[in-house]
Amino acid sequence: MRLKSYFAASIEGAMSQARQELGQEAMLLDSHRTGPEAKHLGQYEVVCAALPAPAEAASESTCAPLEQVFPHNAFRSPSLDKLCSEVAELKLYMQRMAATIARSTAGFASLRSSPELMQAFAVLSAAEVDSNLAYDIVSGIADNVSGSNLRTVLTAEIEKLLRVDPVLGKPGVGQRVTALVGPPGAGKTTTLVKLAAQFGLAARKPARILTLDTYRVAAVEQLRSYSAILGVGFQVIETPATLAQSLEEHRSKDLILIDMPGFGRNEMSEASEIASFLSAHPAIDTHLVLPASLKSADMLRVAEQYEIFRPAKLLFTRLDETESFGSILNVVTRCGKPVSFVCSGQQVPDDLEMACKQNLARLILRSEYFDTQSSAATAAA
């Protein structure tokens, strides 16, 4: 298999270069906007692949396994173990890549026959929507799209994939108890204060803030100050048993918001006890807070790690720190969870909005993506 990156002003232009060099069967594996260090090469980088000829494939399949090269663990060392691990990871990556190519062979051929579908795929790629998901979306609009209604049809297709649930608390439970979990620096504390202001203070409902974040320096004092400003009760919680007791004591409160510490990748074992409590409690509605500025791969990894909390909803912060929002669609479709709220800044109680399918779809399909592709198509003509 031959891989190569191509740079151009548009994804279509890069694909044209790839087909000229790799042949008409060149497959698109990845595409994204170029960073500042490569802007002079083109606005987009496209990674393409060409399948090896049968003779090449046969020669590759005859390579001896590593165990035969080093029989009986000869010359085994930590460096060799690391090499074996890296080879295994590379093999898994290539298998996934091959599956993507096989899946897209027929699909991309159909895209080439329709300028509208090519533009739709280019727009989704520019928004950093996963390639496989982009193929599925484009396939879903193939029978209904035309040059005049492309944006409308594409927006409607994305809205079908999105789920929203901008509600605090579990359905059927009188008291609203919501916990915010997520990685360090995701914006949980600020978001919790915004929720307290909008759904407690503004609604004139009795509320209380609980925090288990005794890890972060000055986190308790920050939240204590916010609580005093809002005029809501505040309590520091140290153990799940204390949390259970506090929830029982404050059954009369309409809204209870629980601020959780951020656990890093290597700290998840420390979260197991409180995660078990939250996931098993019948009244606690857990939201996973994710910065929209994270890459899709990192966002999915965090979502997988925090699955021990059994979050029911996703809440996205820091929308003001990125210009590409396809990762939101990638995570929502992969996790199968609805979006509750989105935050686009640090202002309290502002910069917090209820999740809306239409707004999220418009955010993902920003107008400049269409403008860029239309300009590229005009220049090519």
Image: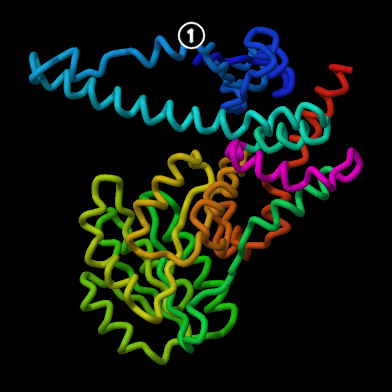
Residue 32, position in %: x, y? 60, 28
Q: Quadrant of residue 76?
A: top left
Residue under the image location 40 percent in, 81 percent down: 283
- Tell whether 109 sits left or right of 344: right
Residue 72, position in %: x, y? 8, 19
Q: Height in image: 53 above or below 120?
A: above
Residue under the image location 43 percent in, 26 percent down: 94
Name the residue carrying label 1: 55
Residue 155, position in %: x, y? 76, 50
Q: Amino acid at mark 1?
A: Ala
The front one of 283 and 94 is: 94
Q: Magenta segment range?
A: 128-149
Residue furthest toward the right? 148
- Tell whether 69 sits left or right of 41: left
Residue under the image location 72 percent in, 19 percent down: 9
84 is within the stretch colored magenta: no
129 is within the stretch colored magenta: yes
Q: Quadrant of residue 251?
A: bottom left
Q: Height in image: 313 above or below 263?
A: below
